[in-house]
Image (spheres, helix red, strand yellow):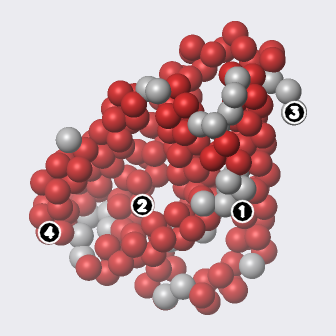
Amino acid sequence: GAQLMLIVAAPILTRLFTPEEFGIFAIYVAIVTFLSMGIFLKYELAIPISQSITSTLSILKLCLGLGALIGFLILVALYFFETEFRSLIPSSAHAIPLWILPVAAINLAFLNLWRFWLVKAGRFDIIAISRGSVSFILLFVQLTGGLLKLGSIALIAGHVIANLVTVLALIATVFRKYFYLLYRITF
């Protein structure tokens, strides 16, 4: 269903946005995806194979700490080396606000982290619902932004908002069930 929504909306989106705006969005997605792959130093891959809920929560705590630290380091690096970074990307992509890149990368990494948690818990129904909600929110924001002629910012905002809302919903789902175990989390 999530993929079908995207396929049905594709012809509409191509009428609302120019190829240049889609190009800027593609550069943004490439950078964010690249940055998000190393946010947790791949420790999130240990979640599905951990032996106990305590070790799983400890891995989760480690990932959250790493995410905050590495995200902050990316933000600082982009701040101090803005001109060097901007020289690496095409001039058409200079419309992308740099502060959004680490925020979106952490957001995407957290989305994947919670999905690993749900794989461990065997909650594939929630994973499917989260994919559907990402697609729905993404399309809603992008179509609204396209109608308002906001350009590539609408495409980027749709991506960030959809992932953020879904991450917050997944956090609420996980912590509602496992909140009582938080005192067991050890380093």
Report the number of numbered marks. Answer: 4
Residue 75, numbered label: 1
- Examine the image and state in which quarter residue 47 appears: top right
Residue 187's disc is 3
Name the element at disc 2.
Answer: helix
- Asked if residue 18 can be seen in this view, the reply is yes
Q: Quadrant of residue 102?
A: bottom right
Secondary structure of the residue carrying tag 3 is loop
* Residue at point 54%, 64% (across, down): 32
| CA distance separating discs 1 and 4 | 34 Å
Mark 4 Cα shell of 10 Å, populated few (<14), some (14-19), many (≥20) = few
Q: Quadrant of the N terminus?
A: top left
Q: CA distance from mark 1 to mark 3?
A: 25 Å
Q: Are marks 4 and 2 in contact (CB under 8 Å)?
A: no
- Which callout, 3 or 2, points at the residue further toward the start of the chain? 2
The mark nearer the N terminus, 4 or 2, is 4
- Position of the C terminus by quadrant: top right
Q: Which residue is mark 4?
A: 15
Residue kind at label 2, given as amino acid type: Ile
Question: Residue beneath label 2, please?
Answer: 156
- Say what amino acid the circle numbered 1 marks: Leu
Mark 3 to mark 2: distance in Å? Answer: 36 Å
Q: Position of residue 152 (x, y in %)?
A: 36, 68
The reply to whether discs 1 and 3 touch (Cβ–Cβ < 8 Å) is no
Select label 1 or label 3 by which is in front: 3
Q: Nearer the viewer, mark 3 or mark 2?
A: 3
Q: Residue at x 24, y 60 (%)?
A: 146
Amino acid identity at mark 4: Arg
**Could you say where residue 119 lies in the image, as x and y percent from the top left?**
50, 34
